[in-house]
Image: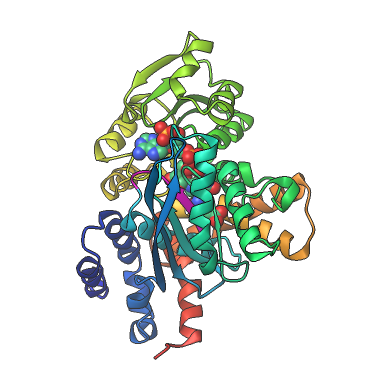
Amino acid sequence: MKLLSNVMEQVLKRNPNEPEFHQAAKEVLESLELVAERHPEFIKAGIFDRIVEPERQIIFRVPWVDDNGNVRVNRGFRVQFNSAIGPYKGGLRFHPSVNLGIIKFLGFEQIFKNSLTGLPIGGAKGGSDFDPKGKSDGEVMRFCQSFMTELYRHIGPDTDVPAGDIGVGAREIGYMYGQYKRIKNDFTGVLTGKGLTWGGSLVRTEATGYGLCYFVEEMLKAKGKSFKGATVAISGSGNVAIYAAEKAQELGANVVTMSDSNGYIYDPDGIKLDTVKRIKEVERKRIKEYVKYHPSAQYTEGCTGVWTVKCDIALPCATQNEIDEQSAKTLVANGCYAVGEGANMPSTNEAIEVFLNAKVLFAPAKAANAGGVATSALEMSQNSMRYSWTFEEVDAKLKQIMVNIYKNASAAAKEYGFEDNLVVGANIAGFMKVANAMYAQGIAY
Ligand code: NDP
Ligand code: 2IT
């Protein structure tokens, strides 16, 4: 890094103890060095210095009462990173690991991802260190209500539109939407991922996983390959993993693994998704339950072991940094020829190097998992029109968006001399639109 090394230095200095944010910023800034060279006007206008600094960061107390009458206190976050091309947009994550640095890395990634969708949405992320695991419905409801009692004043259908992420699904969106509506007396599209009878969009539940497979299929097609007959390893067993598995199977793949933070299952005959959906979506139990129903499958403790299973295509759909350098080397040694990132930043920067050096077809998260937020933006459109499209209409739009993202990322990679490097291509294509908008809108003194 030459032109942008001072920007990275400033990120490190100004944001101590935020390794995930440093990692995300480094990957993007390294990709943008040539852009900086070709666009001195962006340097002069401080675009790079400004884009790494969130427009607004909100941290708040979330007190709630558990089933035993004890007062509990969690911390809530909303980082409104960039609004150059549209209202802030991005999910809410409820997980005990959540801290400001993690929300900042996610919000930063969201700027470029949202830009890649081609739809008018800015970048944001939020969440809490609340752990929904083991909590009753009543506890989750009271937490969500308390969280929204503060968050509501910072969001709005034309200001900031949150959605789900890890630990936030249909149930949590429902409780938060109910509380927002009660406080504001407004029935608006302030959240996405809503239920289908109260403003939600068809396909939003499936969108991230389906979109991931549409993207990967396009990437494979360019090299004369496809999902048909391929052995696929998937990590995670949440929203993204389940619908990635569903679409991969539909496209003819044999999906052989799924996991959670405790361990992974291996079913050489192909994962039975009905069982996974029942365990995870209805019963909210652990993935190891799967082997009770399918004794020919194996369960192994420890989640990173999933990458030792031989596969053609790997779809990491759990969490950040779940594939390190060693796991990447194991995947390559076992013949894996394509990786599609369903989770946000699931590969470390060292793992990405391994994949790119081995000429593995690599679909980076901010391009490959953009189908979720793209469909959220389609939900916003439908809410504005007070109208709903059919499943087929939304699905066709999602597919077209994913194909376009692939085309734009691969064209940008080629234009800048990095043919086939979708990491660089996605970063540049996502950045350009935001940078041009920031440039046009001037600097506020
Ligand atoms: P869910 O909460 O539905 O599922 C998360 C899954 O990942 C669970 O199986 C969970 O296991 C596992 N997981 C979570 N944390 C860890 C960890 N530290 N180590 C190992 N496994 C872990 O979340 P989603 O499916 O929505 O999200 C998965 C990923 O996809 C995240 O990176 C998210 O940011 C990203 N994403 C989500 C989108 C969406 O629309 N939902 C859109 C784009 C990206 P356990 O139950 O044990 O915690
Ligand atoms: O990481 C993501 O893109 C999401 N969690 C989805 C965000 C959204 O607003 O739908």
- Asked if residue 229 can be seen in this view, the reply is no
- Taking depth in this image into account, of 94 and 244 the one nearest to the observer is 94
Residue projecting furthest to the front: 69
Indicate the position of residue 106 as horizontal and vertical percent values. 40, 56
Indicate the position of residue 88 as horizontal and vertical percent values. 52, 67
Position of residue 356 relative to residue 42, above or below, is: above
Decide whether residue 171 is among the magenta residues. Answer: no
Position of residue 5 relative to residue 287, above or below, is: below
Query: What colouring style does the render use?
Result: rainbow
Of the 4 image quadrants, the one containing the C terminus is: bottom left
Which picture quadrant has residue 262?
Answer: top left
**Residue drawn at the location 65% of the way across and 58% of the way down:** 182
- Asked if residue 11 can be seen in this view, the reply is yes
- Taking depth in this image into account, of 33 and 154 the one nearest to the observer is 154
Which picture quadrant has residue 253?
Answer: top right
**Residue drawn at the location 51% of the way across and 79% of the way down:** 437
- Taking depth in this image into account, of 18 and 271 the one nearest to the observer is 18
Residue projecting furthest to the bottom: 445
- Taking depth in this image into account, of 245 and 180 the one nearest to the observer is 180
The magenta stretch spans which residues? 90-97
Indicate the position of residue 173 as horizontal and vertical percent values. 58, 49
Of the 4 image quadrants, the one containing the N terminus is: bottom left
